[in-house]
Amino acid sequence: MEFTAAVIAGFLQGEIVGNPETKVNTIAKIEEGHPGALSFLANPKYEHHIYETGSSIVLVNKSFVPTSAVKATMIRVDDAYKAFASLLLLVEQSKPKKKGIHPTAIIEPSAKIGDNPYIGAYTYIGENVVIGKNASIYPQVFIGDNVRISDDCTLFSGVKVYSDTVMGNKCTIHAGTVIGADGFGFAPQSQDEFIKIPQLGNVIIEDHVEIGANSTIDRATMGSTIIRKGVKLDNLIQVGHNVEIGENTVIAAQSGVSGSTKIGKNCMIGGQVGFAGHLKVADGTKIGAQSGIPGDVKNENSVIIGYPAIDLKQFMRSSVLFKRLPDMSQKIDTLEKKLKEITGDKPTKQTT
């Protein structure tokens, strides 16, 4: 699909610097630009590329002032990065969508499917399932009994949705993700035996949630595991039973949240962060990658890192000492030797 600079600027409410009839039909990094491509410049350290890029159109911030001639047509916008993301969404939405129900899909008679669906090959949809309009269910998806999926949801290939899950509008679940598997609940019966605790709850996923590939969201022991509106989870994330993740929180890959932990809204959590169970994390918390969270985070908008996680500024000061530990250890050894020479090696003087 081809767009002119005038069309793009109109969509973004931007200002054109150059030829409004310049056309693009693809996107590219600014350093890899070529004719017919659209790029963006948001980070000043990449500014030198705009003077050399082969891209036909470049989105720039309104504050950008070039220091040399720019061959490409520029479109000035308030935020080039956000504008570029909006264009990507426009391109994605303009792609033709799959429609219809494949003849190999198995849909139980009691299931209800909304208007305009796509249901791919070898998908199974269980008893009493309700799926809203404009659903895209890719091949080999399993949807268990009594599941409720609202409008405009997309489930990519291999997703497994266990029974009684409830999913809101415009959710996207990527390939291989499992929603509603049993939580990790076992009670010790003797020194070498555990009995499984039945997991009788469900999972509730609210509107506009996106869950990355091969993630797992466990069902609650009782009640619900809840993923609130606008949450974005990366690939390979484990969410335990009875966890609640607040609105618009984002979590990066390989993080794990133990059972019954409550994470607040608008949190930003880096990759490989581990949460102990039964914790509360305050709204707006930011957690650095590979941190360990063994206790509650009580103060809103905290920025923490490390294990156990501490305030970022405190961690940075401590990291200076970490680097000096080998030298400090060597100095201590030297001082101990000198101390022995002064006090420990002299014979004790006896009195008569």
Image (cartoon, rainbow, N blue to C red):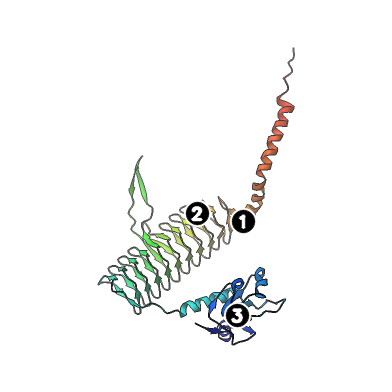
**Farthest residue in the left direction?**
109
The residue that label 2 is drawn on is 274
Q: CA distance from mark 2 to mark 1?
A: 17 Å
The residue located at (61%, 55%) in the rendering is 311
The C terminus, quarter of image: top right
Residue 248 % position (x, y) = 50, 67
Disc on the earlier residue, 3 or 1: 3
Tell me where residue 287 appears, x and y as whole percent: 56, 58
**Numbered circle sitting on residue 57:** 3
Question: Please, what is the three-letter code of the amino acid marked with disc 2?
Answer: Gly
For label 3, the crowd category at 10 Å Cα-Cα, with few meaning under 14, some 14 to 19 and many 20 or more, is: many
Q: Which mark is residue 312?
A: 1
Of residues 17 and 50, the one nearer the viewer is 50
Lower position in the chain sequence, tag 2 or tag 1: 2
**Relative side of 69 to 272, left or right:** right
Task: Work out which residue is located at the far bottom of the displayed protein and give it.
Answer: 21
Classify residue 45 by image quadrant: bottom right
Measured as percent of width and height from the top left, residue 163 is found at 32, 63
Q: Amino acid at mark 3?
A: Ile
Rounded to the nearest angstrom, the CA distance separating label 3 from label 1 is 40 Å
Residue 128 horizontal side relative to residue 215, left or right: left
Badge nearest the viewer, 3 or 1: 3
